[in-house]
Amino acid sequence: MRYYHDGKGLVFPDCDRPNGTEFLYQGFCMAACYQTSDTSINSTAMRRLVATHGMLFSFLSVSIIAIILGMIGNLISAKKIFY
């Protein structure tokens, strides 16, 4: 994997040679919980990448919620016209 070739980046517990499943698990935890759960980060470059991922995903989540609330608001206001 690109961010594990020299042993720096992510440290997975009880795993000497991580495969795609461990990286998928890490990505899901970062996206769903905004945390790294049981995985340790041991390089500055990876910390920077994880922080960037967290900020971008936060912006995406807020944008999706704002769009949904806007659509709900439009539906509610459209129904008031017909009453």
Image: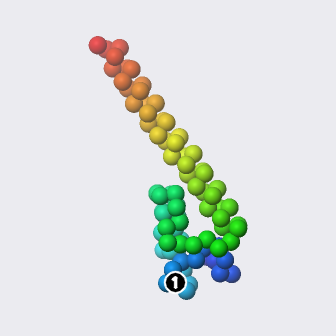
Residue 46 rendering spot, x and y as whole percentages: 66, 67
Q: Residue at x 51, y 46 (%)?
A: 61
Which residue occupies the foreground of this view, 1 or 22? 22
Is residue 25 in sight in this rendering?
A: yes
Decide: few, some or many residues near mark 1? Use Cα within 10 Å; few <14, some 14-19, many ≥20: few
Which residue occupies the foreground of this view, 75 or 58? 58
Which residue occupies the foreground of this view, 27 or 48? 48
Q: Residue furthest left?
A: 83
Q: Vertical placement of 6 versus 24: above or below?
A: below
Q: Residue at x 64, y 56 (%)?
A: 52
Q: Residue furthest right?
A: 45
Q: Is residue 33 left or right of residue 75?
A: right
Quarter holding the C terminus is top left
Q: Vertical placement of 18 versus 56: above or below?
A: below
- Residue 69 appears in which quarter of the rendering? top left
Residue beneath label 1, please? 15
Is residue 24 in sight in this rendering?
A: no
Q: Residue at x 51, y 80 (%)?
A: 13
Which residue occupies the foreground of this view, 45 or 80? 45
Residue 73 rendering spot, x and y as whole percentages: 41, 27
Q: Residue at x 65, y 73 (%)?
A: 42
Q: Vertical placement of 77 versus 17: above or below?
A: above
Residue 28 rendering spot, x and y as whole percentages: 48, 63
- Residue 71 appears in which quarter of the rendering? top left
Badge 1 element: loop
Q: Is residue 71 left or right of residue 63?
A: left
Type of residue at label 1? Cys
Visual colour scheme:
rainbow
Quarter holding the N terminus is bottom right
Q: Vertical placement of 4 versus 80: above or below?
A: below
